Image: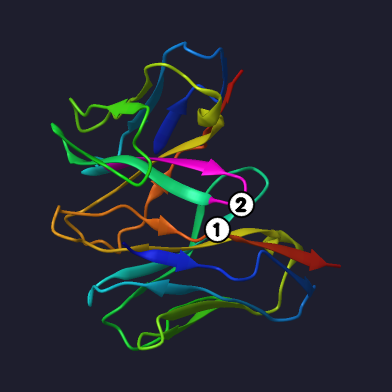
């Protein structure tokens, strides 16, 4: 019963480096999303997807790319890391077909530091 | 755009007492959903309770209940018989469908709940 799996748990990058945060879910959820959590800011939506091949921007999309080639996977790419992207990142998924009250299932988060 | 406001950055309550966390939101939608999530120091996000806007009855889950006032756009969380394990950050969140199939959650900035033994 894996749920939502995020890797890695921790990552340190230098400014300008690129990396991909991985997210996989095994619950056949249509909806997947990425959030970032900063102190005093709550969680803010970066990108989301309502199904394979469909992605859309959230509140803070700049500097991030996503793709959704399968139902299970929703990677988040940082093309050129900046110190402002230092944060904790959460992947979350849910059903859509059962209604929007379907709870989001969260991964355990990735703490990213950009120096 | 929807906004969610939690006006209490931090709350403190004695063990076994009752505490209420405030949340207000702004939306032009008539159909939406509201949630409270708990985040303990482990960083895990845990759903506490949810409410559908079309339901007048307030949701309850054991010691947790909400006071949903749709006209006032208010969604407070009441925790009865507070326990040490309730200590955490609590986030209020809103979700609707603005036509794209499903929107993400909009979160408040959180309330840090401290339980005094």
Residue denoted by label 1: B109
Image quadrant assignment for residue A4: top left
How many residues crowd mark 1 within 10 Å: few (<14), some (14–19), many (20+)?
many
Which quadrant of the figure contains the C terminus of chain B?
A: bottom right
Cα distance, mark 2 to mark 1? 6 Å
> Is label 2 in contact with label 1 (beta carbons under 8 Å)?
yes
Where A58 falls versus B30 (above or below)? Answer: above
Can the viewer see residue A78?
Answer: yes
How many residues crowd mark 2 within 10 Å: few (<14), some (14–19), many (20+)?
few
Residue denoted by label 2: A40
Please give the chain letter of the residue carrying mark 1: B
Where A97 falls versus A57 (above or below)? Answer: below
- For the record, the magenta segment spans A32-41
- Report the predominant secondary structure element of the magenta stretch: strand
Q: Is residue A64 magenta?
A: no
Identify the residue at horizontal 47%, vertical 19% (top origin).
A81
Q: Is residue A33 magenta?
A: yes
Identify the residue at horizontal 60%, vertical 43% (top origin).
B43
Describe the element under mark 1 as helix, strand or loop: loop
Percent position (x, y) of residue A51? 16, 39
Where B79 falls versus B107 (above or below)? Answer: below
Which one is in front, B20 or A107? B20
């Amino acid at each position: 019963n894996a749920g939502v799996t995020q890797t890695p748990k921790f990552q340190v990058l230098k400014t300008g480096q690129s990396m991909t945060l991985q997210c996989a879910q095994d619950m056949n959820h249509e909806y997947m999303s990425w959030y970032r959590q900063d102190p005093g800011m709550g969680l803010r939506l970066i990108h989301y997807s309502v199904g394979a091949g469909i992605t859309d921007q959230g509140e803070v999309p700049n500097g991030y790319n996503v793709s959704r080639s399968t139902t299970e996977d929703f990677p988040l790419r940082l093309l050129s890391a900046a110190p402002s992207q230092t944060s904790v990142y959460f992947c979350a998924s849910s059903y859509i077909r059962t209604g929007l009250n379907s709870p989001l299932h969260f991964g355990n988060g990735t703490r990213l530091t950009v120096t | 755009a929807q906004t969610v406001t939690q006006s209490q950055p931090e709350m403190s309550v004695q063990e076994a007492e009752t505490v209420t966390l405030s949340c207000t939101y702004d939306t032009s939608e008539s159909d939406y959903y509201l949630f409270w999530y708990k985040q303990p120091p482990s960083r895990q996000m845990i759903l506490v309770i949810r409410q559908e806007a079309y339901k007048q009855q307030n949701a309850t889950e054991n010691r947790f209940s909400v006071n949903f006032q749709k006209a006032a756009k208010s969604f407070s969380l009441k925790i009865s018989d507070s326990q040490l394990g309730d200590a955490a950050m609590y986030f209020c969140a809103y979700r609707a469908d603005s036509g794209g199939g499903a929107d993400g959650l909009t979160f408040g900035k959180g309330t840090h709940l401290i339980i005094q033994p």
